[in-house]
Image (cartoon, grey):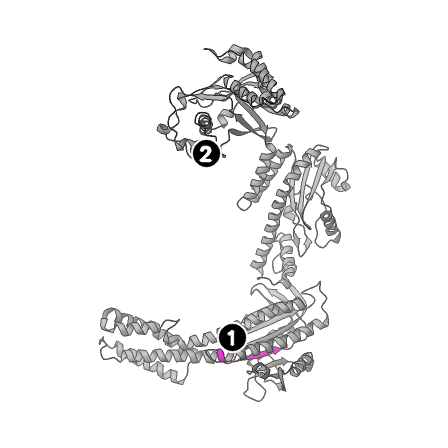
Amino acid sequence: METTLSVSPSVALPFEVRLSFQPFIGFLKAQQEKNRSNTALFSLYEHLLEQFENVPTADERPLEEILGPDRLAGLFQLAALAVMPLTASGQNIAYTFGLPVPMKILYQSARFTNLIEQFPDLLSKLPEDICAEDKLRFLYQLVLEKCYKIPPGKKANPSFRFHKYKNGLTRYFRIDINNTFIEPRLNTPLPALRPAWIDFANGTGPLPEAADQLPLCEFTSEGFAFFVVEDITEAETIQQLQAVFTHLHSDAEPVIYRRFETALRNLVGQTDLQISIVPFSKVNGFYVHQPEVSARSVFFRHSSTVIDGYDPTTQKIIHTLIQNPVPLLFPNLKGLPEPEEQMLARKGIRSFAFYPVVSGKEMLGVLEMASPHPDAFADEILQKIDQVIPLVQELLRYQLHQFRQNLDQLIKKKFTPLQPAVEWKFNEVAWEYMRLDKKEAFNSEATQVRFPQVYPLYGAIDIRNSSNERYKAVRQDFYDQLVTIQNLLSESNLPNELTMPNQLLATTSHWRSKLTVGLNPEDELGISDFLIQDIKPYFQHLRLHYPHLEASIQHYFKQTNPVNGLFHQALQVYERSVEWLNTAVNTYIKDEEKKLQAIYPHYFERYRTDGMEYTIYVGQSIAPKVNFAPDFLHRFFQWQLNSMLEMAQLTHLLLPRLPLPLQTTQLLLAHTQPVDISFRQDEHRFDVEGSYSIRYEVLKKRIDKAYIAGTQERLTQPDTIALVYSNRREVADYLPFITKLQEENKLLPRIDYLDLEPLQGVAKLKAIRLHLNYSNEEA
């Protein structure tokens, strides 16, 4: 097709290409020589050479004026035979022949003409869209390749991208410029090649300074360029969709959706397409309905259908879609339930598409599309949508992750770090709170975490006389420090500054005398204050102003180091011993409790004191899907006895290795009546409900201090396990397991049946005391 189209340059460049066919003739001769053995091609190139060698050369007038439009068109039609594919596909390529600088189109294909008809200004603003630096880079590439034989680098590509708006949609194009048939020349010797020119041409360096630039204005160029314009809307929009996911964590959710929907409309070429992405969140294995998400949905915001985790019909429909995740198309809305069909029709919708998005056996959500046009979703549209489904999967995964994160944050804020056995209940309550859009108070009935009728099991392992042992250690350290202070203050070479040394010496003697009697918390605080507020400042003063005292004062301060100083030695020995025992016990119970979870899911709460104590809650309400048979409770009783016995054996083995020989006592509480528990948000823990249940909490807090009735003997003793109970029925369930341990020689035959002194708020308690047999262990 004939045409001559000049595009005004936006920036004048120091370079111009004049039309000439001489470079093309050189190309034809090279091709003819290469194909000498191919008769058909050789003849073709011979014919083309005959036509182009007869073309006159330019004089003062441009060659295009000399030839005229008709002959020019004929020549470019012949040129197309040499450069275009010799297939029908070549007819569908939008190409032109022309001059690149300044841009001038001399001949264009039918496909290119079709694009011009759709977009009359297709190339008119291209020079403005291309920045001056990119234009110069193109010229650098041309001169370096043709004159210096340096091909463009991989990153250098003589092509430019641009876009056009039409009817609310954006179309993206790329124009590739083939400069094979352009020859730049310089009448003087070529200037020495500079690395900066190559870097700039390849896009790896900046434009050189003016004095160091390539002298483009000294070159003359002739020939013509071959341009190909390609519609890259599909590739560009898919790239934009990919970019959406790059910014998922930085962009606001409305921005993410807007970008996604705009790119998808451009991809399918429908400006009035309604698009929504609906994630199918799960709580405790059931798909649930998020009101704020459904409000964005084309379908669900107008439908009575709700994704209800408690509705088996809804769950069944979703699982059916998982088995066969094919797009559901409703041209003219036919096939939809009548209420939804009428609802969508009233909204001006005539076509609806529903894409289930599945990953493995998991429904991530759906992609919805609605159009005001009947039969809007042709195969061509569906093929484009199929390309972006993996990206939709990523967006849905992000949304589902956000939902899970919000749920977890709500649980952590309102509740506590979760154990797997009860996590489902916290999920359920947190989801209910989110579903109600936070209109309910968190202490309302709807948002309470409760487990009725669960069995409590309590155990404690304590370090015998730990408080007394600590006071003994602190007392020893204080005594050593006060002796050292007294010796320093008694030195004859101390300066006589008023009565300060004598006052400090008197106070030191006073505290030493008190330590010979014992140490109570009030005395511990008093001595600490004396050492910090009186002794330390005075000794620092002496060290600074009396050099002859520096060595002895420095030695004193060295001994106050809490890590390795002499004045903390006894406490360090005590604390290391306690730490060894606690580490051994806590490591054991942590590992054993994991095995216990395999018997039946339960809630386990461990407290660290001067030893370790735990509470277990187990029952049907904690694991509704697992039948709680009576045998499970008996197995928990057996675990209690076995684990307490093994922890006692463990601490007994450690005894000779401890820096300070500390012993442990073992205690269990039998309580075979179920209790109701609820989560206390103020304390972030479970607590019992009801007056009878509260008695259980009182028992836990008091029994470790229990005495045997009529004596001054503590119930808990080293080398024993004490089992406290209120009536014989409670201890009866433990007796078969006690007998078994005695038969295995892990317990001695002796069992003490004891009455306990009344405790505050609790009376008539009883206990049995089991005696450990270490003979097998020691053997």
Membership of 668 in magenta stretch: yes
User: Is residue 157 positioned above or below 399 on the image?
Assistant: above
- Give the quadrant of residue 232: top right
Labels 1 and 2 touching (C-beta < 8 A): no
Q: Nearer the viewer, residue 133 or 290?
A: 133
Q: Quadrant of the C terminus?
A: bottom right
Range of the magenta residues? 656-671
Label 1: state its secondary structure.
helix
Residue 6 showing in the rendered view: no
Label 2: state its secondary structure.
loop
How crowded pointer 2 is (Cα within 10 Å; few <14, some 14-19, many 20+) is rated as some
Q: Residue at x 64, y 32 (%)?
A: 269
Membership of 428 in magenta stretch: no
Q: Nearer the viewer, residue 662 or 371?
A: 662
Q: List the residue tagged with mark 1.
A: 581
Pinpoint residue 180: horizontal percent, then vertical percent.
Answer: 51, 24
Q: Residue at x 62, y 57 (%)?
A: 430
Q: Amino acid at mark 1?
A: Leu
Label 1 or label 2, whichever comes before in sequence order = 2
Which of pointers 1 and 2 indicates the residue nearer the eye? 2
Q: Residue at x 50, y 27 (%)?
A: 129
CA distance separating discs 1 and 2: 67 Å
In the shown orientation, is residue 292 left or right of residue 713?
A: right
Q: Amino acid at mark 2?
A: Gly
Pinpoint residue 724: horizontal percent, then vertical percent.
Answer: 62, 80
Q: List the residue tagged with mark 2.
A: 203
